[in-house]
Image (cartoon, grey):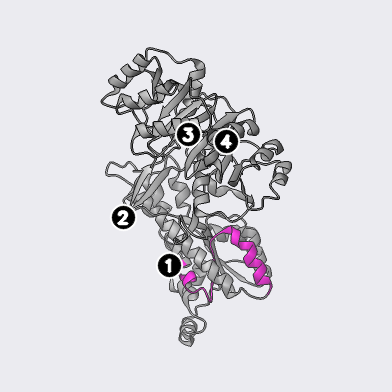
Amino acid sequence: MNALISVSDKTGIVEFARALHALGIKLISTGGTAKLLAEQGLPVTEVAVLTGFPEMLDGRVKTLHPNVHGGLLARRDVPEHMAALKARGIDTIDLLVVNLYPFEATVAQSGCTLEDAIENIDIGGPAMVRSAAKNWKDVAVLTDASQYAGVLEEIKTGKLGDATKFALSVAAFNRISQYDGAISDYLSGIQPDGTHSLFPGQANGRFIKVQDLRYGENSHQQAALYRDLHPAPGSLVTARQLQGKALSYNNIADADAAWECVKSFTTDAKGGLEQSAACVIVKHANPCGAAIGADALEAYGKAFKTDPTSAFGGIIALNCTLDERAAQQISKQFVEVLMAPSFTPQALEVFKTKVNVRILQIDLPPGGDTAWKQGRNLMDVKRVGSGLLMQTADNHELALADLKVVSKLQPTPAQLQDLLFAWKVAKYVKSNAIVFCAGGMTLGVGAGQMSRIDSARIASIKAANAGLVLTGSAVASDAFFPFRDGLDVVVDVGATCVIQPGGSMRDEEVIAAADERGVVMVLTGVRHFRH
């Protein structure tokens, strides 16, 4: 049995090769890999000996040879193939271990040049991988160090089974697809002036299936969940399900909305909000209650008060540890999904009798200067007829310094905190969005209406239905007020300060109305449409 080993990432390769040698498998290798194995005292045949041709062009040509690809592609069950190998003195290659030049890591570096990128495009590696993967019944191909242990154990039992070899073949073709997609994305994103566009000439999605789902948004639709090739830490797909039924399509969509909103309260570096426990309750992709508090119990209690009716069957997300007291309170309502960074053992015990409740544990993102470090998507996509809309994700964080007070009346420190809180929540409410807040909790949420004034009316109606008073409240509008009538509606029910982007041709009229009504108006200069 012959194994050809040629790897850029040498993690675990010496140990794997030593184990193969101990099983009587002949080792063939190239360049740096061959040198490493020889230095470790392993008998290894250089690929140049196999081909009878030295490496050339600075190593660009070394495995592109019939003695290599013939040994990989020959079908052992076709006598003509085996006779051809014998006539030319070519040995079969039964195990191929290859990982590719680090193209993705190279282009991810800020100082990467086109020349750097080109030199890290692997040619011989992918060619060998494709040959071996095509001939999977006779050749096992390994493209990742995580595969070594399992393959080794199976070889020790006698031989690799067809199921394993086919799975390795599929993984190999997937890896080549990912690699070629990364190359296409990078090269087709280069502009005539040498800069690199966020939107390449060809977009190549690279996603890994996590699970099949029972059905999609409706029961007649089929669905599955996929994740990014390299998920951001603290994003929904990194969650661990601790108990409950399988997640549905709608569970996942709503859980993502809740988690994205609640983790936005984790840091106060820019927004000015004090560090607090936060809770967000989502129903049909909209927050129906959100609050901050001293702990999980207080935050949940305040969030639930906003709209107890809509919270029934909702998704609950917390940005802090869920303890027993909060768990006891949450367990009194019907909840589909419960998410938190951690749970005390006592909290989990509370839900043991509620076996259908889906409990997800998700680590909070580490935080940093990139979307990935913040656990966020860099890009958003939306399907349209035979097409795809792509945009940079709405990751804008509002800082206190960004606010522009345009009313004669100046906001108090308490009002500024309420306005910032309301703005954070409004970002995650479907447009047109109006959010009433006070004291670190939502009081009324108006979502998804075709006119802003209707969203304002609905938000006030919901507050009244929940028995909440809007006097002295803060209001956030995700986009500008096109007329003063929307402002009049929120002031009529008790709002005393308003935060909105501005930018309407009638801004002066709306600001004058705020002064006329004696309320604070603050502009952000940024809109948060969400459709």
Is 175 one of the magenta-colored residues?
no
Q: Is residue 230 visible?
A: no
Viewer-nearest residue: 463 or 523: 463
Q: CA distance from mark 1 to mark 2?
A: 43 Å
Amino acid bearing label 2 = Gly
Residue 64, numbered label: 1
x, y percentage for residue 327?
67, 40
Q: Viewer-nearest of labels 4 and 1? A: 4
Q: Which residues are magenta?
A: 130-157
User: Which of disc 2 and disc 1 is earlier in sequence?
Assistant: 1
Residue placed at 69% from the left, 68% from the top? Answer: 22
Q: Viewer-nearest of labels 3 and 2? A: 3
Q: CA distance from mark 2 to mark 4?
A: 39 Å
Q: Which residue is mark 3?
A: 462
Q: Which residue is mark 2?
A: 385
User: Which of disc 3 and disc 1 is earlier in sequence?
Assistant: 1
Is 156 one of the magenta-colored residues?
yes
Mark 4 Cα-neighbour bin, 10 Å: few <14, some 14–19, many ≥20: many
Secondary structure of residue under mark 4 = helix
The answer to whether residue 255 is above or below residue 453 is below
